[in-house]
Amino acid sequence: MKLGFIGTGNMASAIMGGIIGKKMISAEEIIGADLFAPGREKVKEQFGIQVTEKNQEVVEKAEVIILSVKPQFYEDVINQIKDCVKKEQIIITIAPGKTLAWLAEKFGKEVKIVRTMPNTPALVGEGMTAMCPNEHMEKEETEYVKRLLESFGRVEVVPERLMDVVVSVSGSSPAYVFMMIEAMADAAVSGGMPRAQAYQFAAQAVYGSAKMVLETAKHPGELKDMVCSPAGTTIEAVRTLEEMGFRSSIIEAMKVCEEVSRNL
């Protein structure tokens, strides 16, 4: 087997869907383990992968293993599998706060590890993932992992010191954006627009704006200025947002998020 998952929740499903959809690895070459029977049966039915309740079975069969359990379960899972992990296998982690040094200590031997931080837009193929390989990864192996991760969105290799920043700017940030979309829709409903339509307008505006930043390579401030006509509606809305602390509240929220991630 080429790929194994320990944990088959939403993020694991997003990764599976991207990899299988892009035909990088066939479903027959993927195995997933989950103690929660309905969870593993769901991915078996959805993707046609092999499933098991035994984490050790995944390690025994797969070349690359993705630890897709919650951070608080990492130590227990590593204790279960560390004696089975072979030198040539690659371990991919997706847990905030679990550093390469911490992971190496828990495995207690030389292991090829790639620390990553994806986000939930991976569920629709628009994820943003940061990855950081340890010193045991070969260049070709790192490129292979990057291609796997690119199956569900964009990927950047970053130094490990930035991983907590990544948590705040992309890992957790969909929640901030969803809150903004919800608030925009609430305001539109207040103005008389039906709610379902309000969500469409708000979400498409955010999606299109983000696409402009990525595809035009223009500074966000320049793009903002393009919308702000003199004495117009937009500049008054921007003035009010500044008065209410819009940007500073986002910055402060992200700094708190970064600090929490650092101390996990």
Image (tube, grey):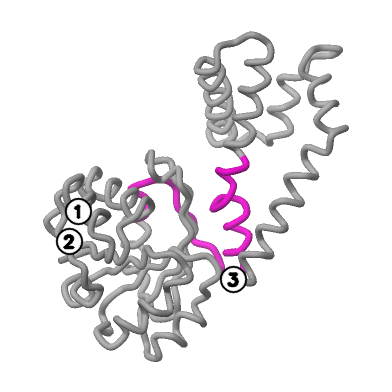
Give the residue drawn at x 41%, y 68%.
Answer: 93
**CA distance separating discs 3 and 1:** 31 Å
Which residue is tagged 3? Answer: 264
Disc 3 residue type (three-letter): Leu
Label located before the other in sequence (2 or 3): 2
Give the residue drawn at x 39%, y 81%.
Answer: 136
Give the residue drawn at x 85%, y 26%.
Answer: 239
**CA distance separating discs 2 and 3:** 30 Å
Q: For the residue labelled by badge 3, is the local secondary structure a helix, a strand or a loop?
A: loop
Disc 1 residue type (three-letter): Glu
- Mark number for residue 51? 2
Q: How busy is the neighbourhood of tag 2: few (under 14 within 10 Å), some, or many (20 plus)? A: many
| Left or right: residue 184 compared with residue 221 | left
Which residue is tagged 1? Answer: 41
Q: How busy is the neighbourhood of tag 3: few (under 14 within 10 Å), some, or many (20 plus)? A: few
Disc 1 or disc 2, which is closer to the eye? 1
Q: Marks 1 and 2: CB-CB under 8 Å?
A: yes
Instruction: Name, please, the residue furthest toward the top.
Output: 192
Say if 62 sits above or below 11 in the image. below
Dividing the image into 4 quarters, which one contains the N terminus?
bottom left
Where in the figure is residue 178, as x and y percent of width and height? 57, 36
Q: Quadrant of residue 75?
A: bottom left
Q: For the residue labelled by badge 1, is the local secondary structure a helix, a strand or a loop?
A: helix
Label located before the other in sequence (3 or 1): 1
Q: For the residue labelled by badge 2, is the local secondary structure a helix, a strand or a loop?
A: strand
Q: Magenta segment, which residues?
A: 149-176
Label located before the other in sequence (1 or 2): 1
- Mark number for residue 163? none
| Left or right: residue 118 compared with residue 235 | left
Disc 2 residue type (three-letter): Val
